Structures are given as C-alpha cells and as structure tokens.
C-alpha cells in the first residue's frame, strides 16, 4: 500500500478572501511542527506520503506537497497552491461528505475529519484516498488553520471490491444451494445471517433479530448443546483452524433437524485483527437419515448374511469379513470360530492375483459371475463353484465393499461327468443298434424277397403244392415277415435327420400332392375335402417326411370313415409366432381316447377292426414329426370324428 497526503478540501462560505504568499504557510508549518508536539504526533500517526496546510482565514490559500499531484498522475509544476485546483478532480458525492465532516469538525474538535474519497487520475481511472485533517485553533478555539494528510488506499479498495464481488457470488451460490450464512461480532455481540439460515429452522430474519441469546445456539437439543458450546468457546480461545459443530435444532414446527455449522475468524484487511467469525450452516437432516437408514440396511444385510441358508459373505473395501453365513463355513471347511475382521486372503491363501484383480474390479462397480468354475484348494482338492460377486453401497455413489454368493456344485459336476460317461456309452450303443437295425432290415428284406420269389416259383412249377393246406399259411407268413421288415426299415431311418436338413416348404403344394394320391378313394367314397390354407404359407420341414405325414393322416381319415355319413375332411393352417399349426379334421369313426389315448402313437397299436390296420402308421408319423422338431396331438370323440393337429416350425423360428 502506498500513501499520499489527501483530504477533502472545501472553500467554506464566509471566510475572508485574502491572498498571502505560500511560503509563509510552509515556514509557519515547519515552526509549528518543531514547537507543537501535538501536530508532530498527528503527522506521525497518519504515516504521511504528503501533506497539506490550509489557511482558513484566507481559504483560497492552501499549500500542498508534490506527492498528492504525483499520486493523481499530474505534474506538480502545473498546479498552484490554491484550494480550487483539486475540487474538480474529486467525486461530487465525496466532496459533499468531506464538506459536511469539515463543518462538524470546525464546530466540534472531537468530531474526526476522516473519510475515504475518490479522485480522478489523469488517465481517467479512480484513485481512492483516505483524507484526514486536524484544525488548528486560536486562543478562543476558532479554527484558523488546518493540516491534513492523504493516504492512497486504491489497492486496498480494489481488494475490498473484489472481496465484495466474491461475497455476492458466494451469497448467490449459498442461496441456490440452500446454505445458511452467518456472522458473529464477538466483541460487540452482534449476529447477522441470511434468509436461508432462518428458513432452515422456520424463522424469518426479523424474528431472529429479536432473540436475546446467541442465535447460533438457540433451540439446540439438550443432549447436543453443551458439546456445541464447548467447541465454540474453545475456538474463540484458540482462534485456530475452523470451528465445526454438528447438532440437532428444533424448528418452528417442533421438528428436530440436523445442522452442520462451520465458522472461521475473518482477517481484517486494515489492521489484520478481527473479532468477526463468519460461517455457514447446512441442513443435513436428509444425509443423517440416509446414513441411519443405510446403517439399518447394513445391519439387516449382515443379519441376513449370518442366517442365510446359502453360502454368502460380506466384505469391506479391504476385503475383510463383515459377515459370513453358516453355510459359508461348511462349504469351505472353515474350522475357526469366526472370520469376522480377518482378510479373505488370509482365510484362502490359495487365491491368486487373477482373482484379486477381479475383486478390485468389483470394488469399482463391476459384477463378476460364473455358472461353474474350478477352485483348487491349498491342499490340492478341487471344488466346483457357481458364484456372483457384486459391490454393496454405503450411499448412492459410494461403494462400501463386496458381497459374494457361492454354491458348491462339486457333487453336481461329478454327477454330470458320470452322466456324460453314460451318455457316451448310450450314444455308442445307439450307433451300434442303428447299424444293427440297418443290417437286419437290409438282410431280412433280401431273405424275405428270396422266400417270396421261391414261393411263387414253387407255385408255378408245382401247382399241386398250392392245394396243400399248409401252403397258404407259408404265403401268409412270408407276407407278414415282409411287412415287418418294411416297418423295421421305416422306423430305423427316422430321427437320422437334424434341423440343419430342414427346408422351406410350401404347405399347400404338399397337401395337394397327398390329396391327388388318394383322389380315387375320395371320388369313390364321395368325400368332401375342404382347404383353408394360404397358398403363400410355408414351414420348415423334411420333404419326404412331410409328404408321408400328410398322406398317412389323410389316408386314415378315409380308411376309418363312418358308415353312417359321407366323409368330410377339413384341412386348415393357423400361423403362430415361430410355428404353424396344421389341423386335419374328419367326421369318421373316432377314437376312444380314454381307453387308448396313452397308446395312440405306439407301435403295432390298432383301435379298429380294419383289415388293412398295421398299427405302424401313427407311430411313424409321430416320429417323423418329432424328427422335424414338431409335435402332434389328437382330439377325438367316438362316432363323431377326429382332429389331428400338427405343430411345425416356420421360417420365423
């Protein structure tokens, strides 16, 4: 900070307009400084950069040293020692203030002539000057001279303005963040606060002003008051750091709210000492309640973990146990009474760097899980585990640690291995059986063909043999054997196809092909066949199987017609998401499903005394449909009719 002599200079009305040389004032001042200690003390206390000396008898005459003009960026040689020289440079409002103080000081020596005024610098900027003055009086107490000093306080004022701006910004932030602010003048026992401070406990500022007790400690909960006061008194005594206190206050509605107070001594810019403490107050009721709720939730979680029937453990961020279920002890053969407080890696020293890395990732918010993983224990034994590791949260965005859910699936894994072994054996046996079936069906077809041919040759060469009573039985036995071999071949080739062989098939084309195949029977029996199938409808199937299925069901509908009415067959398709349903509905003889439903699709099962019934058609049909990934169901009422519904995949699946 730089100093210069400065004061508000006014030309009081009523003073004589006398002109005297300026050197006599300077000389007179020097004489007074030497002879009058009071004047000397005044100069010392003002820490002068410059001085002025004013003749109040001749008010136009005023001596000023060069420092004042240099402070304003003006060449002193261009100015006369006249009071009029500076009056157009001072701010009009400050001139009025200085003139008022001058009059009061002349009337009463105890009234200080001391004010801050603004001058215009030669570059147009503002220079702040602290102006002090002291009237020299005659024997009757009349002011005849005045000595003054100027102090340049521009830097200080700039700092104060910046501070004021920051305070305004802080007030805006505090208000938007609902933070109460307060200030206590300890020496003068004065308390000030913003409106948010009062609103936090339901009071207006006007009401707060009427409180006799220090508002900082009004309405504090009895259990908290002594502790809060002790902290404040300690801070007043030590004047170090920041005053912090947290306590409950009863608001105007009678509800207890949690408050967090912080305060600090404010360093005075002028004398580096202060009795002012400024602070903030924040309503932390929600945070306290949230913390209490989290603590309750944590305790509930801990109790849940302790009593859980599955293997669960809870850890803090250092991977130390907070809780563990009884099943955790059992699954991992932990024999110590308690793992609480111990490191997970102390209990399981076999855990390596990879798993420790997983734990650290989970502590950052990730979730680690696996359906099965091999865990090699320290003693070399193996456990198979399914697990999930996830973080638990202290607050919405603060992770408190980890929770592990595990299950020992070692026995299941061993059973799976056994099942896989059995499956491999069954697959191998099935392949051998299929080969056997093919060989048998092929060779038997050859043998039955030979027998049939020999029988026919014998009949041609030796006609008389046909008259033998046993010959028809031989022919029938050969015929039955041929049919059995044929059926065995058909059964053997079913299910050899997979989904990879399914083709996109137009349904109506294959239904029409089946109808054409039995057209002669349809005409002969006068059957009415109705179709409700969109020509564009397709499904996924094996062409040979689909042709066989449609033909077999259509043939059965004609074969097992009712003698009481003309056959009627309705064929329709309904498209579902991923599947198509094709239904064949007839008005034939029907089937007693209560008696025969469980064996409807069995091999060699017949339900009517029809001469052509082999009991193999529906068995083959069902297997063909299942080989294409579909299903078939039957609804039937005796003497009313039967509905077969086939469900097969379409291109959506």
Image (tube, rainbow, N blue to C red):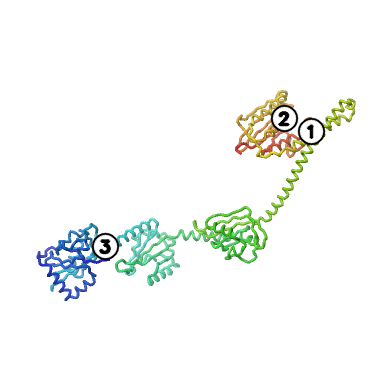
Crowdedness near tag 1: few (<14), some (14–19) or many (≥20) residues, C-alpha within 10 Å? some
Q: Is residue 113 above or below residue 458?
A: below
Residue toward you, 595 or 498: 498
Is the residue marked by circle 2 packed among few (<14), some (14-19), or many (20+) residues within 10 Å?
some
Q: Name the residue under label 1.
A: 483
Q: Where is residue 626 in the image (x, y as percent from the top left)?
A: 69, 39
Residue at the disc numbered 2: 555
Quarter of the image where one finds residue 279:
bottom left
Q: Name the residue under label 3.
A: 154
**Residue located 68% across and 31% down the image:** 585
Q: Position of residue 557 (x, y in %)?
A: 71, 30
The image shows residue 444, relative to residue 256, as above or below, that is: above
Give the mark, 2 or 3, whose residue is nearer the N terminus. Answer: 3
Quarter of the view holding residue 98: bottom left
- The part of the image, by quadrant, that contains residue 204 is bottom left
Question: Distance of mark 1 from mark 2, alpha carbons?
Answer: 18 Å
Q: Is residue 291 left or right of residue 158?
A: right
The local secondary structure at tag 3 comes to helix
């Amino acid at each position: 900070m730089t100093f210069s002599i400065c004061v508000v200079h006014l030309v009081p009305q009523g003073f004589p307009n006398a002109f005297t040389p300026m050197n006599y004032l300077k000389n007179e001042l020097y004489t007074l400084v030497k002879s009058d200690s009071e004047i000397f003390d005044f100069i010392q206390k003002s820490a002068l950069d410059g001085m002025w000396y004013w003749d109040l008898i001749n008010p136009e005459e005023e001596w000023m040293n060069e420092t004042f003009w240099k402070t304003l960026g003006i060449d002193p040689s261009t100015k006369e020692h006249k009071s009029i020289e500076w009056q157009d440079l001072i701010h009009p409002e400050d001139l009025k203030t200085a003139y008022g103080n001058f009059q009061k000081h002349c009337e009463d020596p105890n009234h200080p002539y001391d004010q801050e005024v603004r001058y215009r610098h030669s570059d147009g900027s503002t220079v702040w000057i602290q102006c002090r003055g002291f009237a020299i009086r005659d024997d009757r107490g009349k002011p005849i001279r005045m000595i003054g000093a100027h102090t340049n306080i521009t830097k200080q004022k700039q700092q104060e303005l910046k501070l004021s701006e920051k305070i305004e910004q802080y007030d805006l932030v505090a208000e938007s963040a609902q933070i109460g602010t307060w200030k206590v003048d300890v020496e003068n026992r004065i308390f000030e606060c913003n409106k948010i401070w009062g609103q936090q406990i339901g009071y207006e500022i006007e009401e707060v002003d009427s409180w006799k007790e220090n508002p900082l400690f009004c309405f504090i909960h009895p259990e908290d008051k002594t502790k809060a006061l002790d902290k404040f008194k300690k801070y007043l005594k030590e004047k170090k750091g920041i005053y912090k206190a947290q306590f409950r206050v009863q608001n105007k509605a009678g509800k207890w709210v949690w408050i967090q107070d912080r305060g600090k001594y404010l360093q005075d810019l002028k004398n580096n000492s202060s009795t002012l403490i400024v602070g903030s107050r924040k309503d932390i009721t929600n945070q306290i309640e949230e913390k209490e709720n989290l603590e309750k939730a944590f305790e509930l979680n801990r109790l849940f973990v302790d009593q859980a029937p599955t293997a669960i453990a809870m850890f803090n961020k250092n991977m130390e146990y907070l809780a563990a279920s009884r099943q955790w002890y059992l699954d991992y053969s932990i024999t110590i009474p308690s793992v609480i407080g111990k490191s997970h890696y102390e209990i399981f020293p076999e855990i390596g760097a990879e798993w420790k890395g997983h734990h650290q990732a989970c502590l950052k918010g990730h979730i680690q899980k696996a359906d099965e993983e091999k865990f090699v224990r320290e003693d070399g034994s193996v456990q198979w585990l399914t697990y999930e590791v996830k973080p638990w949260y202290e607050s919405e965005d603060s992770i408190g640690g980890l929770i592990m859910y595990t299950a020992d699936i070692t026995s299941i894994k061993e059973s799976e291995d056994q099942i896989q072994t059995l499956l491999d054996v069954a697959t191998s046996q099935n392949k051998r059986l299929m080969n056997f079936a093919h060989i048998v069906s092929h060779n038997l077809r050859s043998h039955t063909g030979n027998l049939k041919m020999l029988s026919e040759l014998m009949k041609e060469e030796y006609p008389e043999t046909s008259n033998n009573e046993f010959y028809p039985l031989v022919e029938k036995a050969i015929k039955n054997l041929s049919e059995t071999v044929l059926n065995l071949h058909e059964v053997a080739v079913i299910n050899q196809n997979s989904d990879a062989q399914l083709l996109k098939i137009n349904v109506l084309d294959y239904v029409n092909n089946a109808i054409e195949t039995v057209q002669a029977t349809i005409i002969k029996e006068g059957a009415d066949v109705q179709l409700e199938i969109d020509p564009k409808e397709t499904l996924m199937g094996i062409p040979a199987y689909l042709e066989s299925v449609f033909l077999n069901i259509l043939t059965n509908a004609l074969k097992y017609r009712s003698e009481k009415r003309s056959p009627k067959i309705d064929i329709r398709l309904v498209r579902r998401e991923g599947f198509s349903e094709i239904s064949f509905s007839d008005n034939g003889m029907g089937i007693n499903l209560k008696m025969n439903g469980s064996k409807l699709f069995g091999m060699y099962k017949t339900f009517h005394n029809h001469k052509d019934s082999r009991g193999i058609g529906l068995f083959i049909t069902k297997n063909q449909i299942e080989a294409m990934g579909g299903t078939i169901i039957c609804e039937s009422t005796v003497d009313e009719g039967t509905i077969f519904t086939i469900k097969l995949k379409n291109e959506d699946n």
